[in-house]
């Protein structure tokens, strides 16, 4: 890896860490409410992840392109829905719970992940941080997926099951989640075994 790429990735990971920290702190101090400021921070923090697909494509990181793309795409979809519901003032109780869940699951996951990636670029991997990265996912990954699903099903809760474009879209996404969740979860378990044992 060239020095330029290394320092670019360090700047990327540091920036992503800062925005997740700002979002999580702001969300908590706003008594777990998604206000306009928090949504702005969430859009930046989560939106930065699109660059990870490019990093994987360019082979600047070892992450698999397909699983990286699937994970980023699912989160961006949820982020778009959060923005739509927020702007239309259509937050149902299930959406609020979903936002709370993803805010905690995504924030903790990303704060650990980006700090570990940043330090790894400088050949530092604190054992506690390494353990958190490859252990917290056991609870946080299924929790995050549950929160994402709560947000995805919001229109079904509010308008019921009818044959329309969104419900067809939801079925397609259900199939994708049903396939990718076990694949990605299994991948993380294999990573855990490799890194911690």
Image (tube, rainbow, N blue to C red):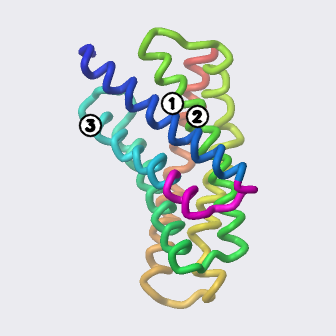
Q: From the viewer's perspective, is residue 161 above or below residue 67?
A: below
Q: From the viewer's perspective, is residue 159 above or below residue 144?
A: below
Q: Secondary structure at mark 1?
A: helix
Q: Are marks 2 and 3 in contact (CB under 8 Å)?
A: no
Give the image quarter of residue 32: bottom right
Q: CA distance from mark 2 to mark 3?
A: 23 Å
Query: Residue 80: horizontal and vertical position, in percent?
Result: 45, 65
**Measuring 49% from the left and 73% from the top, which residue is drawn there?**
84
Which residue does the numbered mark 1 point to in the structure image? 114
Instruction: Tell me if 79 is positioned left or right of 94 in this view.
Output: left
Q: CA distance from mark 3 to mark 1?
A: 19 Å
The dot on residue 111 is: 2
Q: From the viewer's perspective, is residue 139 above or below residue 189?
A: below
Q: Secondary structure at mark 2?
A: helix
Q: From the viewer's perspective, is residue 13 above or below residue 83?
A: above
Q: CA distance from mark 2 to mark 1?
A: 6 Å
Name the residue nearer the viewer: 94 or 30.
Answer: 30
Query: Residue 24: horizontal and vertical position, in percent?
Result: 63, 45
Query: Residue 18: horizontal and vertical position, in percent?
Result: 52, 35
First reached walking from the N terminus: tag 2 or tag 3: 3
Name the residue nearer the viewer: 98 or 139.
Answer: 98
Name the residue nearer the viewer: 56 or 111.
Answer: 111
In magenta segment, residue 36:
yes
Q: Quadrant of the N terminus?
A: top left
Q: Quadrant of the C terminus?
A: top right
First reached walking from the N terminus: tag 3 or tag 1: 3
Which residue does the numbered mark 3 point to in the structure image? 57
Which of discs 3 and 1 lies nearer the camera? The answer is: 1
In magenta segment, residue 65:
no
- Magenta highlight range: 30-41
**Measuring 55% from the left and 90% from the top, which residue is drawn there?**
162
The dot on residue 99 is: none
């Amino acid at each position: 890896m060239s020095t330029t790429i290394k320092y670019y990735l360090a700047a990327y990971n540091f920036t992503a860490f800062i925005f997740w920290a700002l979002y999580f702190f702001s969300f908590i101090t706003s008594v777990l409410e998604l206000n306009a400021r928090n949504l702005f921070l969430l859009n930046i923090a989560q939106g930065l992840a699109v660059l990870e697909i490019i990093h994987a494509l360019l082979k600047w990181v070892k992450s698999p392109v397909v699983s990286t793309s699937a994970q980023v795409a699912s989160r961006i979809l949820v982020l778009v829905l959060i923005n739509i519901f927020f702007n239309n003032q259509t937050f149902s109780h299930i959406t609020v719970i979903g936002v709370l869940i993803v805010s905690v699951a995504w924030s903790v996951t990303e704060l650990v992940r980006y700090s570990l990636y940043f330090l790894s670029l400088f050949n530092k991997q604190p054992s506690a941080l390494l353990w958190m990265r490859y252990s917290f996912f056991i609870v946080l990954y299924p929790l995050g997926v549950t929160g994402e699903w709560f947000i995805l099903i919001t229109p079904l809760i509010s308008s019921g099951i009818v044959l329309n474009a969104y419900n067809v879209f939801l079925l397609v996404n259900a199939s994708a989640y049903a396939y990718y969740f076990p694949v990605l979860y299994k991948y993380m378990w294999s990573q855990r075994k490799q890194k911690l044992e």
